[in-house]
Amino acid sequence: MSFKIDRGLFKYDFIDHHAVLCVPVDADVKQIRKRYLQIARRLHPDSSFTESDEQKQLGNELLSKLVNPAYEKLVGDRTRTEYILILSQIGKRLLQEATSVTLNTDLGKQLAQTPNLDHVYKSAIAKLAQTQYDSLEQVLQVIAQVSELNLVYLMRSASKSSSSPPPVQPKVQSGTPQPNTPKNPLPEPAPPKEDSVVEQYVRRAQSLIDKNQFAQAKVELQDALKLEPKNSHCHSLIAMVYLKQNQLKMAKIHFDNALKLDPNDERALQWKPKIDKALGQQSSDHKVTSSPNNGDKLPEKSGSGGLFGGLFGGKKK
């Protein structure tokens, strides 16, 4: 069975673990653990709900591929904190793209209009949770519906936080003596600026790249691009990761994206011509005419490191 979902937050290349467990996005660990145990008992092969072999297999797949990963993500302190930060950023991003967001369910449309956001949202989630895994064939549709509610809730929460009124300035009545204050007081120093979530991902990725841990660095940068798909620095950095992994075509795609977003990106300007040249050479090498002498094999690369040794300045023999 395919577990692809293309509604709610899933539509934006994001795995909505809260929707899989059908818990509110602000659920605490105790709520998450309680809900997980309910679902795990429901999907267990020995459960009375899974009578046929087909249902047992489907229940096992749902548990191993959706439910268990969601639980592991949401109960770990570090992973849950990062996940909640990403949710907050996605809410702000979707708020900016509100005109392109489409709602498919009546519940989602109702939540978008109700003045009592928290009550309606949590009541709807609790009601859907009661029957979410009753029909295993309908589970993905229910998850999609819950994810749409999560999307609306995050957007409206981001809207409330971004439209808070400015602090009220106290009025000064005439004739009322005021404390002695300097005429031009110095402004208070601004608090140190914290790194954004994307900057934290990039910093971790750079550290991993320095240690040649390219697979982990790629995951960090992919998460960063989910939040800021138009970040040229992220594109050029992940292009370097693909280049180090000998994935030239993927490196070219991201270098192209980086230059579209920032034509002056130094890393992309430096490496893209080399990638284009290497891909051109690779293409010409593949155009080998078959003959009885070569057995239809491609010619061997010569030199240390082959194509990539040349790109990264391998030593000449």
Image: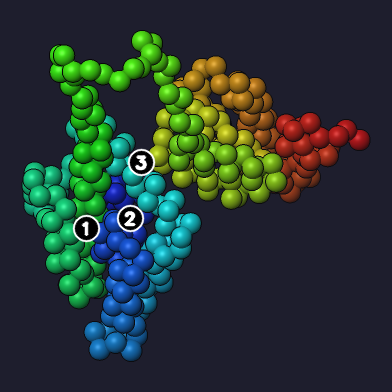
Q: Is residue 52 visible?
A: no
Name the residue carrying label 3.
89
Name the residue carrying label 2.
16
Spatial CA distance of label 1 from label 2 is 9 Å
Q: In x, y percent, where is residue 114?
A: 8, 47
Q: Could you tell me which secondary element the residue under label 1 belongs to?
A: helix
Point 17% across, 66% down: residue: 126
Check the image and report above or below for 91 versus 106: above
User: Which residue occupies the foreground of this view, 187 or 312?
Assistant: 187
Name the front one of labels 3 and 1: 3
Q: In x, y percent, where is residue 246?
A: 65, 42
Name which residue type carries label 3. Answer: Gln
Name which residue type carries label 1. Answer: Val
N-terminal of the pair, mark 1 or mark 2, is 2
Point 91% across, 35% down: residue: 317
Name the front one of labels 2 and 3: 3
Check the image and report above or below for 276 versus 111: above
- Say few, some or many: other residues with alpha carbon within 10 Å of mark 3 (under 14 / 14 to 19 / 20 or more): many
